[in-house]
Image (tube, rainbow, N blue to C red):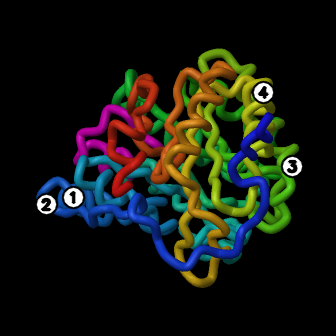
Amino acid sequence: MPPESPSPVTSVPEPPRRLPPWLRRPLGGGPIFARTSSAVHGQGLHTVCEEARCPNRGECWSAGTATFMILGDRCTRRCGFCSVPGGRPGRWIDREEPRRLVEAVRLMGLNYVVITSVDRDDLPDRGARHFADCMGALRREWPELSIELLTPDFRGRADQALQTLAPRAPFVWGHNVETVPRLYRTVRPGSTYRDSMGLLRGAAALPGIITKSSIMVGLGERFEEVLAVLDDLAEAGVRRLTIGQYLRPSSAQLEVRQYVPPDVFERYEAEARRRGFGWVIAAPFARSSYHAELASPAPGFGRAMGFVGAGR
């Protein structure tokens, strides 16, 4: 009887030297891209699309969407995967940001808004009140507006953040675990897997809240380790999930350890759906806010978008 085939990514390979053909993206452009850029920059707003050098910026901005990043462009942590500059904002908050966010949403004509932020460990509430203020400003203009947050873990203030944001329901509360527990010290220094899971569990217990998380692969994790994270997320009540390929934003960030083949993303999606996740995008270019406005991506959405198997 032949031996069983090993699970994908059972060991950590040497860093790959070349980008595989399935990891090629258009730059984007055209009048809608220009309108998105004007709305964002004209209001002096930041986006994670630019600050984190997201490879989907061309597609998303050309479709008229963007992920707004509030609370400045300096993060109080220095995660190994992220290109957002680190620094100490000194408890500074732009109190006019909610108003300018409303104006940008008006100019872009959005009916689904995604808001994220840098980590603000310098603030007593870690920025939770500013999230609530931004949501309040948007809902005063459009009471039925759909909103998705992608928040930090609110280090040491998660319970306070839950109490602050709960009255703004309904909304989608996203928080990314990013990687497997074994790699946290390298990938997310200053964060803990336990804190992330605790926040997600607490948010999932709130009425009117749908919870969401995201995992990057290609950092040296093993296939079975990712499945264990899926188990933990499902147990915590998370119902939406993205799994995407880590791509190094610049030479200052962690090296890619493996370009995960498209068929492995198909396996991840199948495993996620088997665990009860009803909203899943698992594909090389999947990111936490990618196509967030879709009510329920159909199985194989990544493949249908040309992300799986392209160039093979």
What residue is disc 4 on?
A: 236
Q: Earlier in the sequence, mark 4 or mark 1?
A: 1
Crowding at mark 4 (Cα within 10 Å: few <14, some 14-19, many 20+): some
Helix, strand or loop under label 4: loop
The answer to which of marks 4 and 3 sits earlier in the sequence is 3
Location of residue 44 (image quadrant): bottom left
Give the residue displayed 64% in from the left and 39% down from the top.
Answer: 213
Name the mark on residue 30.
Answer: 2
- What amino acid is at disc 1? Phe
Name the residue at 78% across, 27% down.
236
N-terminal label among 3 and 1? 1
Residue 150 is situated, as x and y percent measured from the top left of the image, at: 58, 44
**Residue 133 makes an appearance in the image:** no
**107 inside magenta stretch:** yes
Q: Secondary structure at mark 2?
A: loop
* First of labels 2, 4 by sequence position: 2
Q: Residues within 10 Å of mark 2 (few under 14, many from 20)?
A: few
